């Protein structure tokens, strides 16, 4: 099992920035990829960004050029730098860890609210 603790959310005005952090603990040796998903009220959870153990990244089209995902392997932490935030970015953001056949782990989620 992997435990995930997210931090860094909050309320920000449109055009502002936030940085989310997610610290992993437990069976971290088997992590294939880490990422961030978000779920807005009344909508399905969607991928925001992901990064593999090899450093390859993937972004949702809606955040390309504004969000950057990075990983500090030594600290077992994944970050999501969010710039030029828009009201439509408002959602609960969840950290995610993929471990292949060993399964998927999720953080509890952290609220990001962007006011217009």
Image: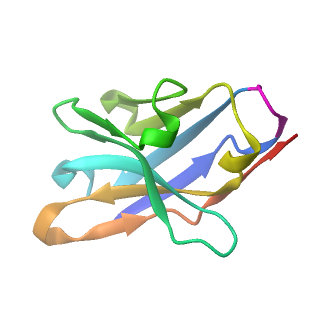
Label the magenta part by its dominant secondary structure: loop
Image quarter of the C terminus = top right
Q: Residue at x 52, y 72 (%)?
A: 44
Residue found at the very far left of the displayed protein: 101
Q: State the image coordinates of residue 2 (x, y, percent, origin top left).
A: 35, 62
Q: State the image coordinates of residue 83 (x, y, percent, origin top left).
A: 64, 25
Quadrant of res 15: top right
Q: State the image coordinates of residue 24 (x, y, percent, origin top left).
A: 41, 50
| Colour scheme of the rendered structure | rainbow
Q: Above or below — where is 54 with respect to 87?
A: above
Specify whether residue 1 is in view.
no
87 displayed left or right of 8:
right
111 displayed left or right of 35:
right
Q: Residue at x 57, y 66 (%)?
A: 108
Q: Above or below — where is 73 with respect to 39?
A: above
Viewer-side residue, 115 vs 110: 115
Q: Residue at x 17, y 54 (%)?
A: 30
- Residue range (magenta): 12-16
Viewer-side residue, 37 vs 79: 37
Q: Above or below — where is 7 with respect to 14?
A: below
Image quarter of the N terminus = bottom left
Q: State the image coordinates of residue 23 (x, y, percent, origin top left).
A: 47, 45
Quadrant of res 8: top right
């Amino acid at each position: 099992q992997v435990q995930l603790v997210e931090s860094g959310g909050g309320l920000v005005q449109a055009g502002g920035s936030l940085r989310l952090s997610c610290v992993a603990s437990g069976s971290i040796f088997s992590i294939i990829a880490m990422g961030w998903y978000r779920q807005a009220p009344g909508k399905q959870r969607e991928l925001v960004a992901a990064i593999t153990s090899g450093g390859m990244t993937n972004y949702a089209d809606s955040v390309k050029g504004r969000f950057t995902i990075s990983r500090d392997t030594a600290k077992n932490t994944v970050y999501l730098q969010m710039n030029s935030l828009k009201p439509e970015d408002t959602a609960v953001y969840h950290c995610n860890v993929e471990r292949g056949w060993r399964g998927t782990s999720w953080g509890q989620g952290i609220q990001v609210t962007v006011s217009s």
